[in-house]
Structures are given as structure tokens and as C-alpha cells.
Image (cartoon, coloured by chain):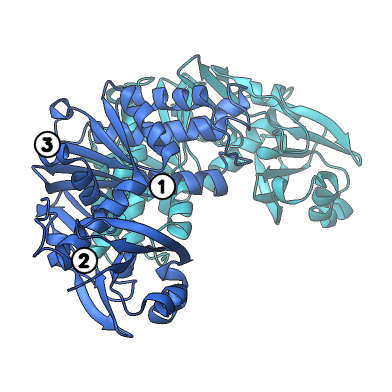
Chain colours: A cyan, B blue
Amino acid sequence: MNVEYVIVADWGSSHLRAYLCQLNQQGTLTVIKSAKGTGVTKIEEQFEQHLMQVIAPWRKEFGQMPILLSGQVGSTLGWKEAPYLPCPVSLDRLATSCLTFICRGHPIYIVPGLSCEIPDKHSDVMRGEELQVLGLLLKHEKYQQGRQLICLPGTHTKWVLVDNGEIQFFKTAMTGELYDLLTSKSVLIQKKTNIFDADAFKLGVDKANSSSVGSFSHNIFSVRTKQLFGELNQGNACSYLSGLLIGSDVHAAIATEQWNISDITEVVIVGDEHLSTCFAMALESQGVQTRVVDEAEVAIAGYSGICNSLFLKDLTQTAI
Amino acid sequence: MNVEYVIVADWGSSHLRAYLCQLNQQGTLTVIKSAKGTGVTKIEEQFEQHLMQVIAPWRKEFGQMPILLSGQVGSTLGWKEAPYLPCPVSLDRLATSCLTFICRGHPIYIVPGLSCEIPDKHSDVMRGEELQVLGLLLKHEKYQQGRQLICLPGTHTKWVLVDNGEIQFFKTAMTGELYDLLTSKSVLIQKKTNIFDADAFKLGVDKANSSSVGSFSHNIFSVRTKQLFGELNQGNACSYLSGLLIGSDVHAAIATEQWNISDITEVVIVGDEHLSTCFAMALESQGVQTRVVDEAEVAIAGYSGICNSLFLKDLTQTAI
């Protein structure tokens, strides 16, 4: 297929982020324009109409180019279901397993999510993060070799174990969603602030680190009592809670039996800059080395990898 | 003081529950009438007006009898601050430490809350539950001897260690508040139900019991994945989440270093009937004996104890 322009979009529950890109013969995407829209759970199933409205100016100028979609758009709540690929899964299967159809002349490709299951122990799913993992491995080839533990913080943290370029296992933590709920709807925080207080954050991480058994619902009440006892105030209570939540998440991730943390050279963190720094601090407080990589670069590299496979694989070799 | 009628009221953040009682010479209160009002955080500081409005018919009939208040009404958010009594604290101090004042001719007594602090380790507070603990010890005298662990489930679970009638230490868990937030505002539950499914509850408890390190924010995502994998459905997901939350709370309580659970003959549970049964199931799944006592009886016994001390102590001995 002779493709010069492609639209790629992360279409999650809450947001649609679309990019008009140019694809060169080396399989690299260059972002030309971007546009925002609404998430799949908020548009009353008007998927086609909403997408076409968001990309209308690009359609007019560049015609019926392919559209590559990732995220919850492929879930049961989304436009069309792209079934999960079960782990272990080699990431070159993402492109070959895309759900494809034609809509108003555009070839549409929906990237499948991943699932993993250890019967009676753990079951998990992801949609969207698989593309960032693919992008990371393409952008930084050294991570295609050996065992890597990748942390993707966000509303739901994903901890992903990669072995020689194959996703073996992953775990989800509700850390970001819990932070949002507890800072806006609970008795713990009277007034949410966005000021980061590193000392209070560290105090929260230390509290989580010093808890040898699962005492999350006991520990979090300390956000309130420390304010009553004058050890925290309205200005730094959110940072302490953040430390407690991220510290607990990291504490549990380090102890996960599906990997041995001492075998991991460094945990690679892919996410928003502030959150990534927080996770790095919590991991380093437990003696774990980290490396933070640029989230935006990695996402475009992931879309490039898929486009490369879909449109150029007769010309160049896919990297993994 | 010659007192025949008394108003007692639990005035918390969300609700006011007032009772008109008759006090006999044996120091026992008999409830004659009850009335409901609004919690202290919801009446824009119109404490006097609101209380007088709720008890207006009783004032008219019986005059200016004493009013005994417990709960958040004595906090910094309430009517007047009744400072916390620090643990260890003997419960006979509750009556002698009441904050007293006169309002429209009524003698008002606000029961103080309790605080406990282990520097750099744990700080905690309660308001209202101390009265239930007092009531329990008065109603069931055997608990005045030796070490007792009392569990008071609710929006915030309280775990209270009593030694020879004295409160030594307590811990708070946000279990009920987390359940409310997660069932009504999170991605985990699409539709909240009140149907209790004992098998799903048990599954959640087992999940919490089998987690050897603090992995709360990792575990709770299983509420969603088990629905995606067909292991749970909309009808029983809430019960599973309840099992996970109560199981985690119990798991942490059992491991608390301020008591040795093997020294505790039985955990005494004082709370709402359904919640008490749930906590009993979770404790028994870990081999801990329990006894559930009637919450309403215990509360009135607590108020009786205070009235006894305040108004009749020249006639009868207070029990503790």
C-alpha cells in the first residue's frame, strides 16, 4: 500500500487524542497536526460521527488516509471489539492482529489489547499501554534483549515484564484512580492542592515501606490524623497521600512473585514527567535503579512500528 | 442532681440521632422517644438552632432536662471542642471529662473523644466509638478483666485494645468509606447492588488472605478483571469487593504489632448486623474466634454509664 499520510489516535475512556502524521520510507512518523476529542464512554456510541468530525479538516485536505486507533476504542465499551491477545505475546503480533474495516473510505485499524492469566491467581488486561511498550522497545533497542520490568504510571499503573522482546506478564494497580477519589471525595483531604512537597511525599513513601503486611486501609487514615496532630497541613497532605499510594504500589510491585526484582537491572518508567519522577523516587528508596524515558517519543515510535508493519513491511524489516 | 428525663444524642458528621430517655435510680436509661436530625458538617454551624428544633416537642412536654451529646459535635468541626483524652485512658474519665455548658436552660454535656499516639509510628483519634466501648464493658462485665480486642466496623473501622477496663491503643481503617467510594465512583463497579453473595464475599476474603505483602491497590483491580473474564458479574462484584476490603482490614488488624492476636480469646464485634457478620466471617477465616454483640443495647448502656456518673454517682457505684 502506498501510504504517505496516516492518522493515529489514542482513543481512551475519557479522551481522544488524534495526530495527523507523515510516514517516510524508513517507517518513521512525523506529527504534522494534532486534535482532541471525547472519550468512548462519553459520546453515546456515536463513534463514527465523532471521529469524522474531529478529523474533518484533515479529510478535506488529504483524503481517505488510513486511521490507526488504540485504547478503549477496541473494548466492549468502544466502537468495535478487538479481542485481547493473551500473554506471552510477541509485540510484532500487534500489527498483524489489528481489527480492520473501512469507514467512509478510510481503512481503519484498531490495535488489540493484551490479557494475561495465571489461573486462580491473577488475571489482567491492558489497552493502549501495549503500544507504549512496543514504542519503547523500538526506540531503545537494548530493551529487546533480556528481562525488563517496565512501569507505566497513570490512572492505572501497569507493571510489565518483558523477556527478549515478548510481554510475559503484567499487573495493574489502581493508584491514580485511588488518588483522584481520595483527594476529591474522601474525609482525608479537605482541599486538594497541586503543589508538590517532596518531604511530605517521602514521609508517605517511608510509611508504606515500613509496613510489612497489607495495611493500606489502616495506613491511609494517617493522612487525616497527621493533620489533626499538626504533622501535616492542608498544603502538603496531598503529597503525603501520593507518597503513601505510590509507595504501596511500588512496595507490592517489588514483592511480586512473577519476577525477582534483584534480576532487574533498572526499572524503565514511561509516563507523565511528574508521576515518573515520583515513581522513580519511590523505587530508588527501595534500592531499585530506574530510568525515565520520554512518553511522547515512545508513543509515536509505537505507532510508527505498527504503520511500518502494516504499510511498509515489504520494504523494511520490522525491528522485532 | 435530681434527674428523671435525659436526652442523649449521637451527633456525627452526617446524622443526628436523638433519644428521649427516662433514668431510673439504678442508673438505667429507658428510651421513650427518638428523633432524627442533620449532621454537624451539614447545618452551616447552626448547632443550637438545629438541636432545639429537633427536640422541641420534648422540651415542651418535659422542660429543661440535661442533654448528653457524643460524636463529631465535640470536634473542631462541631459545636464546641471537647478535647481528646489521650490513651491509655480509663473509661470512667469520659463522664468526668465532659465539656459542660448551659444552652436555653438545658445543661449540655459533650463526651470527649480519645486520641492515641506512638511517636513516629501511629497517631489516631475516635469520637463516638468510645461510648460504645464503655457500654460494652458495662453491659458485659467480663470484658472489664484482661485483654480484649474490640472491632467496631462502620464508615471507619476502629480496632480497640482494652486492658483491664482501660483503652490502651486503637487503630482506624477507612474500609467503609473506601467501599462507598469504589462502588459508586470507580471503574470497578458499573452498577452498585445491595444483594449479598456469600461465595463472592468469601472469594474476596481469600484473595486478601493470600496476599503476603501490601498489595491492596494491585488486588482491587481484580474486581474489574474477574468481571471481564466471566468469574464475577454485575450481581456479585460488590460482594467480592466487600470481601477484599474487609479481608484486607482484618488481615492488617491481625498482624498489628501492638497486640498479639494469639493472646486474644475472641474479638468482640460491635456494629451494624450485616457488617458485623461480614467481619466475623473474615476473622474466622483466619482462625480467630469472634462474638457479635448488639450495637443498640451497647450504645444505650454507654449513655447510661455516663448519666450514672453524672447524675447518680452519690447513690450507686459506677461499674468501672
Task: Same chain for labels 1 and 2? Say yes or no.
Answer: yes
State the quadrant of the C terminus of chain A: top right
What x and y, as percent, mark residue A207? 23, 46
Q: CA distance from mark 3 to mark 1?
A: 47 Å
Question: Looking at the image, which residue is at 16% across and 41% down?
Answer: B141
Circle 2 marks a residue in which chain?
A
Q: CA distance from mark 3 to mark 2?
A: 31 Å
Q: Is residue B23 left or right of residue A114?
A: left
Binning the other alpha carbons within 10 Å of mark 3 as few (below 14), some (14 to 19) or many (20 upward) gives some
A59 and A24: which one is in front? Answer: A59
Question: Looking at the image, which residue is at 54% across and 16% down?
Answer: A88
Task: Same chain for labels 3 and 1? Say yes or no.
Answer: no
The amino acid type found where label 3 is placed reads Arg
State the SS at label 3. Answer: strand
Discs 1/2, front: 2
Circle 3 marks a residue in which chain?
B
Q: Which mark is residue A73?
A: none
What x and y, as percent, mark residue A109? 76, 33
B159 and A217: which one is in front? Answer: B159
Note whether residue A52 is visible: yes
What x and y, as percent, mark residue B165? 11, 46
Quickly name the residue at label 2.
Answer: A230
The answer to whether B191 is drawn above or below residue A225 in the figure is above
The amino acid type found where label 1 is placed reads Ser
The amino acid type found where label 2 is placed reads Gly
Quickly name the residue at label 1.
Answer: A276
Residue at the front extreme, as displayed: B25
